[in-house]
Amino acid sequence: MNERILEIRSLRKEFGGVVAVKDLDLSVDRGSITALIGPNGAGKTTVFHMITGFLRPTRGDITFDGVALQGRPVYTIAEMAIARTFQNVQIFSNMSALENVMVGRHLRSRSGFLGSLLVPPFFRREEKEIRKAAARWLEFVGLGDLARLPAGSLPLGSQRMLEIARALAMEPKMILLDEPASGLNARETVAMGELVREIREMGITVVLVEHDMELVMDISDQVNVINFGSLIARGTPREIQANPEVIAAYLGE
Ligand SMILES: Nc1ncnc2c1ncn2[C@@H]1O[C@H](COP(=O)(O)OP(=O)(O)OP(=O)(O)O)[C@@H](O)[C@H]1O
């Protein structure tokens, strides 16, 4: 097994005249927590969009678990066991917390999400199993007691946890978290950090875009710093915090 689960080579994305991602090389070790940091507009979210197939690269290669991803549609990438969360939480507000997680689980099931809407009798047993598994994921992220509440009624911190539970229900090998601590208070941020570590303990690789430097430096194995669409540094949190170029570009004096 390759110890690099994700390899990105010369990845580029242009929007008209704007070069959002500029010939970026990036690799992610299997089983690690790997952070992408950098100033606003550096291109971090655009990288996530290209890994997950939401955006097509202008050029470059993305290899996940030995398979080329570029040009594949979003749903096949989800099937390949990459899950993600979004900078602005994307949940179904009117559905219960449990139902939101079940949607993630259905993507993994034989009947699929559409099948679950039709609910023919022979899928009912699978439906029950999906409900059980979803409940377990809700417990895992600490929302077991809130399963029946409409997702939209939950505080932001819980909504972010819910989105992670839904991603985990897809049984990913790798999960991409886009600013998971954004908008969270100090207590919620600590809980988020603990959850991310637990995800790694389960053997799932975590890639994280995050502006909360305390959190990033606390939980990451590797930190990649992006500026103007290019990688300017890669290293352990300790190495990154001591890197003069990073301090000048991003961390400040
Ligand atoms: N759909 C788009 N059309 C045109 N320009 C875009 C589009 N998406 C992103 N950009 C531009 O690409 C650049 C990179 O944006 P991106 O959102 O990837 O940055 P980021 O590092 O994630 O920033 P932030 O930390 O603020 O979320 C920015 O200059 C942005 O304005």
Image: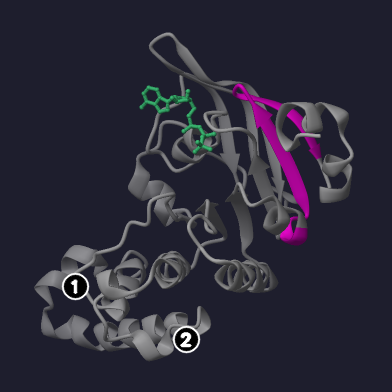
Quadrant of the rendered image containing residue 122: bottom left
Foreground residue, 75 or 214? 214
Q: Which residue is mark 2?
A: 139
Quadrant of the rendered image containing residue 38: top right
Q: Position of residue 190 (x, y in %)?
A: 64, 70
Per the model, the C-alpha gap separating discs 1 and 2 is 23 Å
122 relative to 174 in the view: left or right: left
Q: Which residue is mark 1?
A: 116
Which quadrant: the C terminus?
Answer: top right
Three-letter amino acid code of the residue under disc 2 = Glu
Q: Position of residue 100 (x, y in %)?
A: 30, 71
122 versus 50 height, above or below: below
Q: Position of residue 2 (x, y in %)?
A: 73, 49
- In the image, which residues are magenta? 218-234
User: In the image, which is nearer the foreground, mark 1 or mark 2?
Assistant: 2
103 versus 82 height, above or below: below
**Would you say residue 233 sits in the magenta stretch?**
yes
Residue in the picture at 57% in, 60% down: 173
